[in-house]
Amino acid sequence: MMISEKAKQHVDSCRFCWMCHHICPIGNATGHERSTPRARALGISLVNRGAIELCEIMDNIYECAGCGACVHDCTTGWDPVMFTGEVRLQAALEDELPVYINKMVDNCLDTGNAYGKTAMCETLTAAIAAHSAPTDTLLYLGVDARYMACKQALKAIRVLEKAGVAFTVLADEPASGAQLEFLIGAAEETKEQMAAAAKAMDAYKTVVIYDPADSKVIKQTYKEYGVALAAKPVTYTAYLAELVKNGALQAEKKNKTVVYQDPFQLARDLEETEEARAVIAAFAELHELHLNRAETVWAGNILMAQYLPDVMKKVAERRIFNATSIGEKAIVTASVSEYVSLKAVEQSEVEILSLEDLILD
């Protein structure tokens, strides 16, 4: 298996180390040692040494959420997310991807999204059409919101309307490349999809990115992959914080106490933690989960629920338990994917809200 020498060094350093054993959300949800970064490194090292075949570890390779909790917790600087991504790329090059992953990759290439969706709901289609006129600002919704969370995408539009912002939404919005980057890493197909998205965004001065998964890729990974972007990318949370600060988005304090679920893409990758809190504090009383900001615990996503639905349910249940264990009754999230994951849990103890729910209620 052809992975970089750097990746091999990290694999050999992680395979017998237990430092991040307690922090992996997948490992904690499954209770299986094989789900941890250490076990993933051990499997990869066995492939590198010719003891087992690459195909034997690929299901395990796709258990990694890429949330970076292990990387953040490692005091010696090892990076399981990095070597997991390299193995995914190599598996794609060697035609060793699991069938269910191959299908999602094909969907990304054929339809722009891993779900194979080609049509949005009628209400969202109409709302997008109402903002088809060119402006200086593009609201980039992302594939999860457009095809799997129509109501939340619609609310994202309504919030900017409430603030009186002139903005454009594309009916034929190109995929950011975030899903392909998760599935097969730095493949040429991934970079081509990113470049096409960047070209479309460059028709605007500012791109407001709704989904933190897209924000991380557009603001960080594009640069790493050499994809040029002339437009100014801004996270939706940072944009809302500025609207609240300058008074364009009028805040009315509600009699509600909430905790904030930090998306790891914002808190760890982009080091953005206070913008969403500024928005929430303007509309409700904000408390904190014990694990917050860069220490945040991932609450699941829509993409992995396509092939690990039971595990995603357990991941979300554990995060809800983190709130109930300290007596909190409402969680606000800025991630459309985590919102869907948390809402999918059947429970009545904790109210699950998006930033948009809080603002528009």
Image: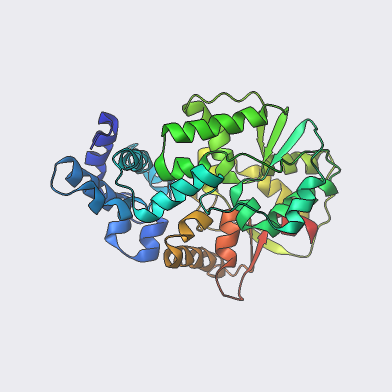
350 is higher (above) or lower (below) than 135: below
In-image side of 174 versus 8 (left or right)? right
Q: Nearer the viewer, residue 89 or 316?
A: 89
Q: How many marks?
A: 0
Instruction: Pinpoint residue 288: horizontal percent, then vertical percent.
Output: 60, 56
Q: At which x and y percent is residue 183?
A: 42, 45
Res. 166 image quadrant: top right
Residue at 51%, 39% (x, y): give it.
269
Which residue occupies 64% across, 23% down?
Answer: 230
Q: How is the image coloured?
A: rainbow
**Quadrant location, the C terminus:** bottom right
Q: Is residue 101 visible?
A: yes
Question: Is residue 297 something that shows in the picture?
Answer: no
Q: Is 151 located above or below residue 346 in the figure? A: above
Viewed as shown, does residue 150 lie left or right of 25?
right
Quadrant location of the N terminus?
top left
Q: Residue at x 56, y 49 (%)?
A: 263
* Apparent side of residue 37 relative to residue 29 in the rendered image (left or right): left
Report x, y in % for residue 31: 33, 65
